[in-house]
Image (spheres, grey):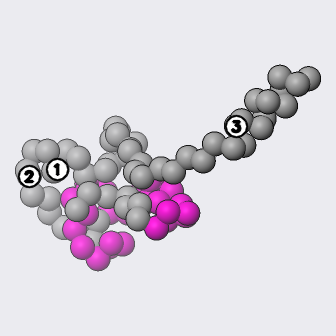
Amino acid sequence: MMRIFYVVFISNSVNINYLSAFNFGDSNSDTGDLVAGLGIHLDLPNGQSYFKISSQRFCDGRLLIDYLSKFSIYSHFSGYLY
């Protein structure tokens, strides 16, 4: 019983501060890495419908990483590359 108490006590006393979030793109998440890596130019809308600036993505809407960064307690998270 004491071992369980120590584990709970130690796990509750650890403070973790995340400085960044990584989303490695695949077929379900278009993070803009392919466009940035290859240096190709995308035709419109490439993200401009929501972000109002080019996000260098093949999709035009928001992704899961955008929602996670929006509702995160950390205000410096960004869901796309600049």
* Image height of 14 relative to 55, above or below: above
Residue type highlighted by circle 2: Ile
Residue type highlighted by circle 1: Val
Residue, disc 3: 11
Between the residue at mark 3 and the residue at mark 2, the CA separation in whole angstroms equals 46 Å
Q: Foreground residue, 39 or 74?
A: 74
Query: Could you say where residue 42 lies in the image, as x and y percent from the top left?
Result: 14, 59
In primary-sequence order, the first of circles 3 and 1 is 3
The residue range painted magenta reads 49-75
* Image height of 36 relative to 55, above or below: above
Q: Is the stretch drawn in magenta largely helix, strand or loop?
A: loop
Residue type highlighted by circle 3: Ser
Can see residue 46? no
Query: Could you say where residue 49 lies in the image, as x and y percent from the top left?
Result: 32, 73
Please report the residue visible at 60 percent of the width from the left and 47 percent of the height from the top. 15
Between the residue at mark 1 and the residue at mark 2, the CA separation in whole angstroms equals 6 Å
Mark 3 or mark 1, which is nearer to you?
3
Residue, disc 2: 40
**Given the current orientation, which residue lies at the most extreme right position?**
1
In primary-sequence order, the first of circles 3 and 2 is 3
Please report the residue visible at 37 percent of the width from the left and 61 percent of the height from the top. 78
